[in-house]
Image (cartoon, grey):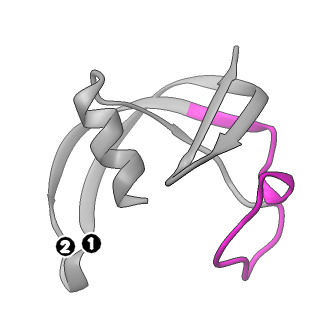
Amino acid sequence: SLAAVAAAQREGDLLLAVSNKADGIDDPTVDDLCRIGVLGRITESRPGKSGGLRLVFHAEERFHLRTVERDSFFSASGE
């Protein structure tokens, strides 16, 4: 989400990318997320079409989610 990207950019550009377990889920819940993701760094950000963003994201390591919370975006802890 745009809110997650903005928070990552304020905190050193680290972002966790996680897939949904199934296709076609537009508004996932915590239970809809895979427990393995990729922790990486945003190296470039520019405006995209329709008010979105285009990001260049460099993966750094796999990440296993232990806990996940949702406010205006998902946040997770793990290793």
**In the figure, is residue 57 to the left or right of 34?**
left
**In the figure, is residue 30 to the left or right of 47?**
right
Q: Determine whether 41 is above or below 32 in the image.
A: above
Q: Residue furthest top?
A: 79
Q: Which mark is residue 52?
A: 1
**What is the span of residues highlighted in magenta in the rendered image?**
21-38
Determine the image quadrant of residue 47. Answer: bottom left
Residue 3 lies, in percent from the top left, at 37, 53
Q: Residue furthest right?
A: 31
Q: The residue under label 2 is which amino acid type?
A: Gly
Q: Give the residue displayed 72% in from the left and 66% down from the top.
A: 28
Dot 1 crowding, Cα within 10 Å, few <14, some 14–19, many 20+:
few
Q: Quadrant location of the C terminus?
A: top right
Q: What secondary structure is marked by label 2?
A: loop
Determine the image quadrant of residue 44. Answer: top left
Q: The residue under label 1 is which amino acid type?
A: Gly
Q: Label 1 near label 2: C-beta < 8 Å?
A: yes
| Residue 62 seen from this side | yes
Q: Give the residue displayed 72% in from the left and 82% down from the top.
A: 24
Q: Give the residue displayed 68% in from the left and 55% down from the top.
A: 19
Q: Which residue was labeled with disc 2?
A: 48
Q: Quadrant location of the N terminus?
A: bottom left
Q: Give the residue displayed 28% in from the left and 45% down from the top.
A: 6
